[in-house]
Amino acid sequence: MPDPLSERYRELLEGSYDCVDRIVLNAYFRMGHSAGGFRTWWRQLTGSEETLDNTHLMRLAGRFSRRLRAFAQAKGIPVVDCRRGERKHEIAEQYLTSHTGRPGLFLILVSKAQAPVWEVSGKHHLEWKDPQPYVNHYSFHIWDPDWGHVTIKISGHPPFPAQVILNGHEYAAAQAAKRGISFTKEGNCFTHISDAAGLARVADALCDSRTIGRLSRVCERWIYTCLSFALDSEEQAQSGFRYQYSSYQVEYSRNLIFRAGAKMERVFQALVDRTRSLLGVERVKTILGRKQRPRYRPRQKQGRRWEVVVERPTYDLTVFKVHCGRLTLKTYTKGERVLRIEALAHNTEELRRGRDLSKFPLLVARLQQILERFLEALHSIDVCFIADETLEQLPLPAQLGQTRVGGIDLNKPRLRKVVEALVTLSPSPVGFTASQVATKVSSLGLDEYGARRAAYDLKKFRAKQLVDKKPFSRRYQVSPQALQALTALLVLREKVIKPLLAAGCHPQPRPRRDNLTPLDQHYENLRLGMQGLFQELGLVA
């Protein structure tokens, strides 16, 4: 079912598709993460606990490094030692441009990061080093026939925890090419598609239960080959070393493909201007590229290979972010005419659906719900509406269950700030608490405002059906219809009534400006047109 924001701009769109983006899986050897399990594994590996000491653990880590570098030198695979602060993905992109597309390992990056490391004391007693030390991590950059660019990052110390980094757009591109769907892919984005419905079906395949097997197969295909530099296949079998997988980070995006880049830019900039102040977005980041987007679609050269296309900010890239704990909601432009709305879970624990790989479809479904909730909030704020009777009924007392509560008087600064807080907190996928409302209201300049006062004010808004309490929870949420009304109340007061009254109090002619924005021009026309009305009503001298 299309979201209201996409429906509003349907006539300007050529198509749209949803896709899972970045996927980060944690790979771990369960037995190796407990002292007793690690001791048992070491006994299976070496036949005795006598060699279980810090020296032999360091030797195992050193062997990993020596074997890896010797193999890379023999096969002509570059090994890059990264310095602190270097962006590893940019280094990989440089090597990816010259890659032939043949499956296999094409680059190894070495960098330091924190990792769990065992420390052995007397009588082979094991404890984790605290704090976790910085140790070498080896990032194996691999080209996979089904998933494109895959990165496997392994710690050099036992129990060799690892991360597998994939991208759903790479998978969709590989599968679309196999099905004969022609497309143009710029970076992590499809900009031209011959069969939008066919590509959407390919991308949707990452949301079903079969994705569990797809992810498991790509991990098993490569991770034990990378581990063989530390433990060869015989040692892996002898000690019973097997990885298990859990989801750590997942991104889900909706991509709106506009017919013309210039129209997309106007729509997006207007959306940002109207919603950023209401949602409390303090900073909108713009990465400068080409000054203007083309008004018409440029003719593309034939035979462009998606495997070697690298993302660059060819056009101005504006990123609009809303942070909700360990979740991030983003809206930004990609390529010349694609608007992307994205939900990112920095830690899937925040989604409360389980982290085991078998729960992956549930995580994606939850992110889809969060994304659609965000789009509803954006649309409700962008297109606000208030019924005629709402302004008259707001100040009147109301009934909430058996309790009679007061009305909502927006002439009071406290209640106006509560409305601002509710609009700002509305995109939160898990709702919000009275304490969060109190914190937000305090940040808006009302210092002596606590959770008890917030709970009392929320009762007033619940009585007016402007706020709903989630069942079996202490959290609240704002429905799309109520959000439209709350936004309209703020916009009417702050953007219409106050400017008009201010203009009526200062009727003197103003110096003419030639660089007025469209919004400023509307205000100027209203000011001039309302002066006569104010004089007739006696509002000005």
Image (spheres, grey):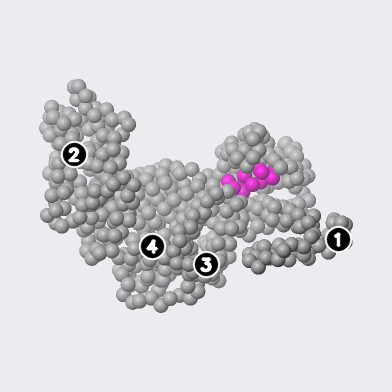
* Crowd band around label 2 with a 10 angstrom C-alpha radius: few (<14), some (14–19), many (20+): some
Q: Is residue 113 magenta?
A: no
Rounded to the nearest angstrom, the CA distance separating label 3 from label 2 is 52 Å
Of tags 2 and 4, the one toward the viewer is 4
- Please name the amino acid that badge 3 sits on: Met
Residue 377 seen from this side = no
Label drawn at residue 312: 4
> What crowding class fits label 4: few (fewer than 14 Cα within 10 Å), some (14-19), or many (20 or more)?
few
| In this view, 89 is above or below 528 | above
Residue 505 in the image: x percent, y percent?
A: 80, 55
Q: Is residue 47 left or right of residue 141?
A: left
User: Which badge, 3 or 4, comes first in the chain's sequence?
Assistant: 3
Q: Which residues are magenta?
A: 415-425
Residue at 69%, 45% in the rendered image:
416
- On screen, residue 212 above or below 15: above
- Dot 1 or dot 4, earlier in sequence: 4
Q: Which residue is mark 1?
A: 535
**Residue at mark 3:** 264
- Mark 2 or mark 1, which is nearer the start of the sequence? 2
Residue 368 vs residue 309, the one in the foreground: 309
Tag 4: residue type? Arg
Q: Position of residue 158 (x, y in %)?
A: 22, 37
Give the spatial CA distance, label 3 vs label 1. Answer: 43 Å
Q: Earlier in the sequence, mark 3 or mark 1?
A: 3
Mark 2 lies on residue: 61
Question: Rounded to the nearest whole Å, what is the CA distance between mark 3 and mark 4?
Answer: 19 Å
Contact check, label 3 and label 4, Cβ < 8 Å = no
Q: Is residue 419 magenta?
A: yes
Binning the other alpha carbons within 10 Å of mark 1 as few (below 14), some (14 to 19) or many (20 upward) gives few
Residue 36 in the figure: left or right of residue 173: left
